Amino acid sequence: MASGKKKALVWVVVIIVAFVVGIFFAPLIRERAYKIKEWIVKPPILAPRTKIVKLYFALPQGEYLTAQQRKIFLPRSTNEENKEMKIVLEELIKGPKKNKSKDLSLTIPPETKIRAVYTRDGTIYVDFSSSLKEKHPGGATGELLTIYSIVNTLLDNFPSYSRVQILIKGEPQATLAGHIDIRHPLSRNSDIISAHPPQSDQEVRG
Amino acid sequence: MKKIGLVLVLVLFAQASQAYQNYSIGKIDVHSQSSRTQIILKLSQGTGYVVKDLLNPPRILLNLYPANLTPPKREVKIGDKFVKQVRLERDSRNVVKVVVDLAKDKCVYDVFLLKDPYRLVIDIRKPEEDIIAGLLKRGTEEGKQLPHPSSVLPHPKKAGIQRIILDPGHGGKDPGAIGPSGLKEKDVTLAIAKGLSALLKRNLGVEVFLTREDDEFVSLDRRIEIANQLEGDIFVSIHANASWNYVAKGTETFFNSRYIYGEGAREVAIRENSVAEAEKIPEGAKDILLDLIQNQYRNESNKLAHLVQRELCHSCGLIDRGVKSARFYVLRGAKMPAILVEVGFISNPWEEKKLRKNNFQLLIAKGIYQGLAKYIESFNKK
C-alpha cells in the first residue's frame, strides 16, 4: 500500500515536471514545426538575383568618365534598395575589369569602405570610411572623377533618385582634397561622361 | 536562478542602451561673448549635419541626421549681439531641423561636432578684422612701406583693377597632391604665386596680396574671407593637378559654376549673354538684379579664365586642356571675378620634373601674368 502511494506520488511529480517542461518547450517545438513547413512549401534553393549595372571609370587623360557594364550577384536576402546600392558601390571601388578595358582607371581609393547608405526625399546619402579622403591622390581632376563616378553610378542605376550626398564617417565634408564643394547633395553630371568611349562590347555609352 | 537573473539584467541593459541610442538632443548651452556667440547642442550620439545659410531674414539652417527631439519643438531666446534665437523642430523620422536666427547678416559661422561627450557647436562671430592688419604687417616686412589699415581701407573706389588676390593652393599640414618622386603641390603653388606677385607689382603697379606667404595651413573659408575683406578685384587660386592615371597631363583653368565642366562652361557663356540682354528689366525686379550681380562675376571669371588659359599654355607649352567650370569651394564665396589655375599634373612624372624647376615655375608665372595683364587692359578700356 505504502509502495502504491509512493508510486502514485512519483507519477504525479513526473506529470507536473512534464507539464512545466512542456510549457517551456512548446514554443520551440512549434517554431521548429513552422520551419519544417517552410522547407516543404518553399523551393529549397533560389538562384541568386543578378543585376546588370553601369559603373563609371576614368579615361586615361582624366577628362572624362565612361561606363562599364557588369553583371553583379545580389544575395537572395537582399531586397532592400540601400543594400543594393552598397553592393553597387563596392563593385565600383573594385575598379574596372582590366582585361576587358586596359585603359580605364579606378576613381576611388581601393581601401575605401562603405559605412552606410540611406535615402531620403530623392537623395541618396552615402557614408564612406575616411580612406576616401585620406588616400585620395588630390588634384581637381582626380576629385571631379571620384565625385562624379560615385554620383553618376548611383543615379544611373537607381533612376528614381536625383541627388547624392557624400559623407565621410557620417559627416558632410567641405571638399575631398581641397577643391570641389561637396557640402550639399550633387546631381548627375552628364558633361563629364565621354561622348566617344573606347568602342568594345563591354562599354556602353553614358 | 542565477542564470535567469543574468538574462533579466541583460534584457534590461539592452533596452536601456536602446533607449540611449535614440540620438536625442539634450540641453542647449549658449555662450554669449562680445566677439562671438557659441550655441552648444548636447547629443547622446554623433550625428550628421548639413548647413545652409539663408537671407531675409538672415539665418543659419542645419539639418541633423540621425537625431531626435522630445518634445518635437523647442525654442531658445538669446537676443545678444549675434543671435536672436534658436529654433529646433523635429522634421521627420530621425531628422531635426535647427534654425539660428541671426541679429545681423554680416556674420561668419562655423559648425563642428565634438566628442566625449558628443556635442554640436555652432560658433557665430563677426568677420575677423585682424586678418587685414596681419596681411599689411607682412607687407611691411617685405620692405614695402604700407600705410595704416584704416587709410588703406575701404578699398579705393577708383575705376579699374587695383588689387589682386593670389591664392597659393594648400600649405602646412595639407601638402596637396604629391608627385611620383615626392614633389609637393604646396611648394610649387607658393613658388609660382611669389613669382607672379613680383611680376604684377613690378610691371602693372597693382597691389597684390597672397592668402599665405609661407608653408602654413590656411583653411578654404579663411582664404575666401581674406579675399572678400580686402575687396580684391581679381582672385587667382594656383594649384597643380593630379589624377588617377599618371599619363594625364596638361594645363587647365577653372571658374566656378553650378554648371559643371566643358559643355557647361559653354552653356554658361550662352546663358550669360542672354542675361546681359535682359538688362532692361522693369524696376522692382530685385531678385533678378541680384542674379545679375552674381552672373556679372561669372561672366568676368569666364573671360578671365580663357585669357589666362591661352597665355599660360602659350608660355609654358603644356597641353591645353581648356577652360572648365565646376563648383569650387574656394571660388564659390569670392565676391570678385575668380579663377583657379591647374598649371600642370604633378602626378605625371614628366610634368612633375618640369614643375620642380625654378625656370619652369617662372614661365608659368609669366603666362598667368600675361593673361591677367590682357584682362586688366581690356577691363580698363571699358
Image (cartoon, rainbow, N blue to C red):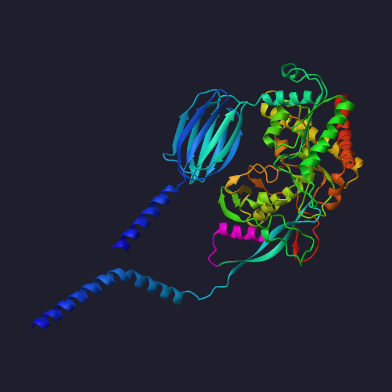
- Compared across the picture, whether B331 is left or right of B28 comes to right
Position of residue B378 relative to residue B151, above or below, is: below
x and y percentages locating residue A26 in the rendered image: 31, 71
Which range of residues does the magenta coloring cover? Answer: A76-92
Q: Quadrant of residue B141?
A: top right
Q: Point out the image quarter for the C terminus of chain B.
A: top right
Asked if the magenta segment contains residue A77, the reply would be yes
Residue A190 visible in the current orientation: no
Looking at the image, which is closer to me, B222 or B180?
B180
x and y percentages locating residue B287 in the rendered image: 67, 29
Residue at 80% across, 39% down: B189
Residue at 68% across, 61% down: A94
Q: Point out the image quarter for the N terminus of chain B.
A: bottom left
- Compared across the picture, whether A146 is left or right of B194 comes to left
Residue at 54% across, 25% down: B33
- Compared across the picture, whether B324 is left or right of B64 comes to right
Check the image and name the residue furthest to the top: B151
